[in-house]
Image (cartoon, rainbow, N blue to C red):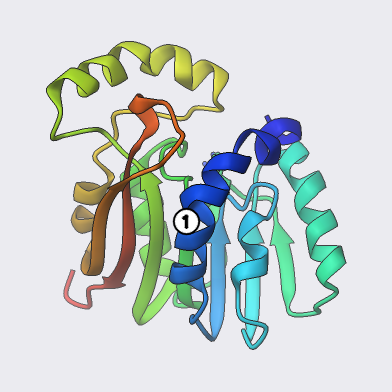
Amino acid sequence: MAKFYDVGMKKTELLCLSHWRKELLGEISGDVLEIGSGTGVNLKYYPKTLNRLVLSEPDLNMRHYLSQRIDELGRDNISMIKNTAESIDLPDESFDYIVSTLVLCSVHNQLSTLKTLKRLLRPNGYFIFLEHVADEDNPKILKWQKRLEPFWKFIGGNCHLTRKTEHLIKQAGFHFIQLERTIMQDAPKFVRPIIKGIAQKHESL
Ligand SMILES: C[S@@+](CC[C@H](N)C(=O)[O-])C[C@H]1O[C@@H](n2cnc3c(N)ncnc32)[C@H](O)[C@@H]1O
């Protein structure tokens, strides 16, 4: 998957993902954690002025391409860790922003992952997300997502098609500052529904 990821996603990247990455990441600041960084597609969208950028990627093959991209940038404020998102053992309240793009579909347990991310965020910290989700508005597509999910998970590194990620983000104790439901162009219909936006750590939850 790592070898073909960038090539396979090229058209979708050009049509929509690149614009969304720029919009979501272009103005963030401070200490940032990205989970499931893959080949490092997001790297070029982060401002040079970030204080610290930690990239987590559990897949060895993805890390091969990711470390090449980190080296190319030659910045000493970027580091890479091998943890899954749910097993990141950095101290509580380490980050101002946490970024997840097309990752929550693949983690083992969304709620415990999101609770870990909440623990890692500073008070009022931001969770930036761009995720493909269950098509809750279209029963016909949802039916296909359910049918295809076992196969898709098998070939796609545990990628689920029917996750209701928006509800889980709320359940984990975030509130939405910005939330958009849209579609990922040039993707199969069952991977098209997208949510993207910014959620803030809710102090009282
Ligand atoms: C579809 S790729 C997305 C890569 C990149 N974030 C992007 O926007 O193109 C999913 C990534 O999530 C990683 N991943 C899978 N399970 C994970 C987990 N439990 N914790 C963190 N990352 C995970 C995979 O190794 C892969 O790099």
Left or right: where 133 falls relative to 91: left
Q: Residue at x 42, y 61 (%)?
A: 117
Residue 175 place in picture, x, y as percent: 20, 68
Residue 23, given in percent of the width and then of the height, sits at 45, 70
Is ligand 1 less than 8 Å from the beta carbon at label 1?
Answer: yes
Placement of 127 over or under 8, stated as above or below:
below
Q: Dot 1: few (<14), some (14–19), or many (≥20) neighbours within 10 Å?
A: some
Q: Amino acid at mark 1?
A: Ser
Residue 64, image quadrant: top right
Query: Which residue does the numbered mark 1 point to in the structure image?
Result: 100
Q: Secondary structure at mark 1?
A: strand
Q: Residue at 49% x, 80% y: name it.
A: 28
Residue 55 found in image quarter: bottom right
Q: Is residue 119 left or right of residue 103?
A: left
Q: Nearer the viewer, residue 146 or 186?
A: 186
Q: Nearer the viewer, residue 139 or 201?
A: 139
For the C terminus, give its image quadrant.
Answer: bottom left
